[in-house]
Image (cartoon, coloured by chain):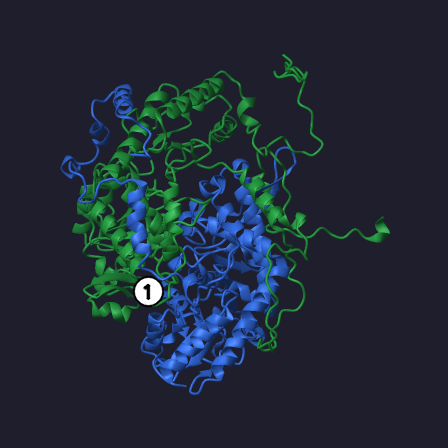
Amino acid sequence: MRYLPLSDTDRTDMLAKIGVKHIDELFADIPADKLQHHLPQLPVHKGELEVERLLGRMAARNVPASTVPFFVGAGAYKHHVPSTVDHLIQRSEFLTSYTPYQPEIAQGTLQYLFEFQTQVAALTGMEVANASMYDGSTACGEAVLMAHRVTKRNKAILSGGLHPHYAEVVRTLSRMAGDKVETLPPDLKASENLLDKIDDTVSCVVIQTPDFFGNLRDLRAIAEKCHANGALLIAVFTEIMSLGLITPPGEMGADIVVGEGQSIGNGLIYGGPYVGLFTTKSKYIRQMPGRLCGQTVDADGNRGFVLTLSTREQHIRRDKATSNICTNSGLCTLAFTIHMSLLGQTGLKRVAEINHANAVHLADLLSGLKGISVLNDSFFNEFTVRLPGNAADTVERLAAHSVMAGVPVSRLLPGSGLDDLLIIANTEVNTDEDRAALVSGLKEIFSC
Amino acid sequence: MLNRQGRPTTPGTSDSAAPHTFTGNRALDQTEPLLFEVGRLETTGVDYEAPKKVKARLGGLARKGEIGLPGLSEPEAMRHYVRLSQKNYGIDTGLFPLGSCTMKHNPRLNERMARLPGFGDVHPLQPVSTVQGALELMHTLAHWLTELTGMDAVALSPKAGAHGELCGMMAIKAAIEAKGEAETRRIVLVPDSAHGTNPATAALLQFEVRPVPVREDGTVDPESVKALLGPDVAAIMLTNPNTCGLFEKDIVAIADAMHDAGAYFYCDGANYNAIVGKARPGDLGVDAMHINLHKTFSTPHGGGGPGSGPVVLSERLAPFAPVPFVRHTDQGFELVEDTHQAEKHGAHSFGRITAFQGQMGMFVRALSYMLSHGADGVRQASEDAVLNANYIRAGLADLMSLPFGNKPCMHEVLFDDHWLKDTGVSTLDFAKAMIDEGYHPMTVYFPLVVHGAMLIEPTESESRASLDLFIATLRDLAMAAKRGDKERFTGAPYFAPVRRLDETRAARNPVLKWMPPEPISEAAE
């Protein structure tokens, strides 16, 4: 077996040195009737070539985003990631290292985490960022729990524009933790009245921008009302690239900003691993979940970095910890940081402009089709259209013709009566030919 | 000796101290500033065409002012991050005996498989008809996990070990609610030797945590569990093999006692790698157990993540599994994405714990590992991991102290600091001296139940020669400590990229991001 260096001779000699005759003497604490004497009912070992064949066959049954006109978004986005990124994150010293608990031999990891925290804080317009969470949805759940700790209240209001999976994660966590949640109905045109929901029993309002339907939200009035009532405003995003072009939530009064960082540096990978971003104001850092990297000096007075404020964390505080989380998205944060370093603010602004311009262009093309309307007044790279028919069926039919048209709202909000709505994302990867294929596909289906 | 060009080919005798270099660099060890100190605001390392000219539809919310993030050209970025990587220690660098963390070899075949466009470049919400191979992979992985563990079902979506714990305990809470016992069963038993995530998870779900003492042999006594049992107990969270590196020999009696009391048995599967193919948690009475794919099944640790923590469930808990899950029907593979849809299949899912389907990239790597090893290989890996740990125990038992006696351990061996008494050397000092010898230290000060713990897990990936050198090095260090060579330890590390770091200072005055230096005012010049 190519991954196991010991030979049978080694094993025999080592058992002798340990002073036992048979390997099972080392497993003597397993109750005798529970020790497995037969191999599991599974295939035996395989060479690389056979494994490649087997998995290659499975992979070939999927349609990769790069091979078709691709407009699927709604929380994960197809972007171009520079080749440098994947090369660098596969360097052994990054790939095969552990959480930097021995900082003297993990300065590589710690320094990029410090760079990552700096980048995320600047993008969101916030004072501090942690070293990342599992993904955007779990970061959102943790943000609500943190708001409860800060306000000592336990009621969250969820906007109807929040990604339905994120809302479900918050609801599951809250139900299990005995907290209250009120979710507003799906808000197609950013017209919900959140202000009337805010009073002095509310811990936090959770609002997404760009929202699930693609609308951009001005958070200032809501932030003001939250603060007047002692509540926190949690702003959420699923498309970090939007912050290259739109006013960051931190400049609109948000207290906690969380979201998904996949778009920068990370591929689609059928949903994970991604990278959850978590930021807040300095005054709340001791209530923040997750790892933090901080700057310090070594015994010679030289700059170095360590994990810090770990007295918040489970390995020290156990049942009094701010969160049960004991990991971050290490390698995904590295991918984010490298891609973001290559972009710089100049490149980020440019690629964000391309996303927006491509989306505006497509929205205009679709608005020209009879019976199809774009619902959004404002958007970044994603918007919602109303079709003259069922959106899920339309997506299936177009997929059969190798066009991935978008995400039917009914897939994430089943039973909501929104069966004719389709969410369409358009990024820098989409060409004029892609857009033409989508337009002609819709024309053919609806004879418009 | 001089060569023919007159260049000396042997180093001079080094009675002179090494000079300070002008750059601060030391040959391959380069000092590297932060990217913000080398980058420029106008620089970018990507080239894009100009955007189409359109009328913006940003609703008056266009970003004003600079973001303040500099960029790097591609060669600068390459050098910056390569230099940073060289300040890290990884499994590929050397022996990484971090107990409880399982730093085994990460096969590169797994990396190649995860990057196949059919896995790496598919969207979680594209039509199910276009991702049948992805669902097949998840279904196959689930089959391997349930077959190996002897459990009924598996929830794949948890994103890491602690997330798996949360998922498993949520399933237990849902089952208790379904029986109408939510108000009464409010206590979760957690042994003192448990990972911190166990009590943190239980507390998050509003359970009251009650500690279970660990007896003198390092395991849990079923009698002390029974003494705490009653109609108010929901579950026990027990790690097996435990964090002292020992198999809980009375695990069946503990499981029976829990079940007799109407409670559940959550097993922390962090150390499952010791018993794969040797014992099945399902046979031991486990109701839920998370499996760290990044430990047992070799997906890379990546400097602290991403992980993946699928949870296997017993028949009693399977109906409460979270959405989404995969079903295999005559028409192909189906993805059940919401609780109403789950009801139709007779499930009472407790809900969703993450967006989308889980850590697909890790599923591919883990299955690639399993297919490579096969039924015979995974079992051999467990045996070799246990053999290697015991070989280290045998090699060091006469010099270092074993808190529970010199008896067989599982995949990791636990020492305490009794043997360092009166040397002036602490466990931390000893660990830092190992860095200078080219090793990553073992896990230190965990588990909390022994003083100055040193938990060594070599894994099955080490050759005998590698173990022999490691044992010899630790023996040299141990004898140095005992003969009073204190500075070797208290000043260590001497040869790492940085010397020992001041963690107190970092926590007292947190600097959590880079700030531009204050501009020097002209008046001051």
What residue do we see at 30% from left, 63% from top?
A: B324
Q: Quadrant of residue A185?
A: bottom left
Label 1 is placed on what type of residue?
Answer: Thr
Q: Is residue B368 above or below residue A285?
A: above
Residue A249, visible in the rendered structure: no
Q: Looking at the picture, how far across and down is residue B514, in whole percent? A: 63, 51
- Left or right? Give the position of B6 relative to B119: right
- Left or right? Give the position of A82 relative to A317: right
Q: Looking at the picture, how far across and down is residue B172, in whole percent? A: 26, 57
Foreground: B59 or B5?
B5
Q: Is residue B61 above or below residue B177?
A: below
Q: Looking at the picture, how far across and down is residue B350, in whole percent? A: 29, 64
Give the structural element (helix, strand or loop) at label 1. helix
What residue do we see at 27% from left, 51% from top?
A: B141
Q: Quadrant of the C terminus of chain A?
A: bottom left
Foreground: A2 or A318?
A2
Foreground: A5 or B130?
B130
| Chain rendered blue | A
Label 1 crowd bin: few (<14), some (14–19), many (20+), radius 10 Å: many
Q: Label 1: which residue?
A: B130
| Chain rendered green | B
Q: Quadrant of the N terminus of chain A?
A: top left
Q: Is residue B53 above or below residue B207?
A: below
What residue do we see at 47% from left, 73% from top?
A: A435
Q: Quadrant of residue A64?
A: bottom left
